[in-house]
Amino acid sequence: MFILSTIRYRMVLEVMMNASFSLAVLSGNGSGAAIAATCLVLLAALHSALGERLILRPLFADGRWSSDLPRGATQSILRGAWHLTSLFWLGLAATFSGLSLTVATAIACLAAGAMILVGLRSHLAWPLFLLAGLASLDAGRQLPSVVVYGLVGTAALIAVFVAGAHLYWAAGGRRGASRAVPTRDDGAPLFAPGPLACAAVALALTTFAGLLLWVALGAPPWWPRVGLGLGLLVLILRAVGDGRYLGFSKADHRSAFARADDALFTPLVVTLAFGALAAFRLAAS
């Protein structure tokens, strides 16, 4: 009965949404757009409010279901996916109200990315939504230059700061070191980076910061662009992860490193990647 009620509920909403589009298309005037926008706003409100009360909360209160992911993460994904549908219907409503498609898409994507970043930072969707939102603004020539320069500056500062942390570890400092290395199932560190390895990472991050500023603020030769592109590729691979210990695809989310990676390390890597993309954007303008 629960599944049948859910299917009927979604069918009613879909019929209402299709009707709103049909009214807008057939009318061809302001009244049709107003009706479509009103229907979509109403759909979004009903979808989130009734879905939360009639579907999500009863489902989460039932202890008989499980998934391969932790229950809390599964609930966050289901709740986020449900309410994101409402968010994008509001974005569609905004286009009928006169907002350009690129700006409406950008607002919806940026809001979706922010929601997922706050609610489920370990999910790959938030950087993709944020990137889609920024790219939509850029496509509509609405991306403020201060945002682009801000991404470059923030990425450069992060790279220098993290390089300093690695120099601290290379010099023998231990604060934070226990959470900076992935661990096996038995809790043993996956590897033991020595002073030279920490110093090499610090050098790579400092070089990345220099290339970032060089590409963004000047007219560099080809090799700094290639170097920054290689750095961007490494960052993307690090953010996606190896399927076991690192990044969005890691299997373990419970160890001290995994929690730090979800909360801080991977988001910092994503910010560095965004900074590199912003640098290339400035170089192309």
Image (cartoon, rainbow, N blue to C red):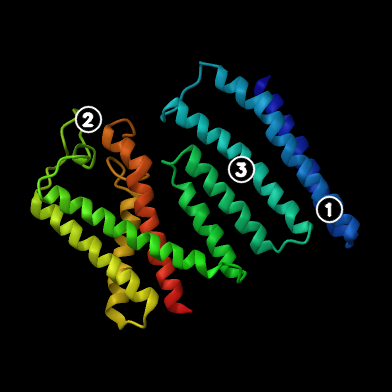
In the picture, measured across the screen, residue 283 lies left or right of residue 78, that is left
How much space separates mark 1 and mark 2, taking CA atoms? 56 Å
> Does residue 251 show up?
no
Q: Position of residue 81 (x, y in %)?
A: 57, 39
Q: Secondary structure at mark 1?
A: helix
Q: Position of residue 180 (x, y in %)?
A: 23, 42
Q: Position of residue 238 (x, y in %)?
A: 31, 52
User: In the rendered image, which quarter is residue 282 located in?
Assistant: bottom left
Vertical order, 130 against 279 (above or below): above
Name the mark nearer the viewer: 3 or 1: 3
Are the residues at dot 1 and dot 2 in contact (C-beta closer than 8 Å)? no
Kindly identify which residue carries mark 3.
84
In front: 32, or 4? 32
Name the mark nearer the viewer: 1 or 2: 2
First in residue order: circle 3 vs circle 1: 1
Kindly identify which residue carries mark 2.
185
Which residue is painted at 42% across and 30% down in the image?
69
Give, as a three-letter code, the residue at label 2: Asp
Crowding at mark 1 (Cα within 10 Å: few <14, some 14-19, many 20+): few
Vertical order, 284 against 190 (above or below): below
Indicate the quadrant containing the N terminus: top left, top right, bottom left or bottom right: top right
How much space separates mark 3 and mark 1, taking CA atoms? 23 Å
Q: Secondary structure at mark 2?
A: loop
Give, as a three-letter code, the residue at label 1: Ser
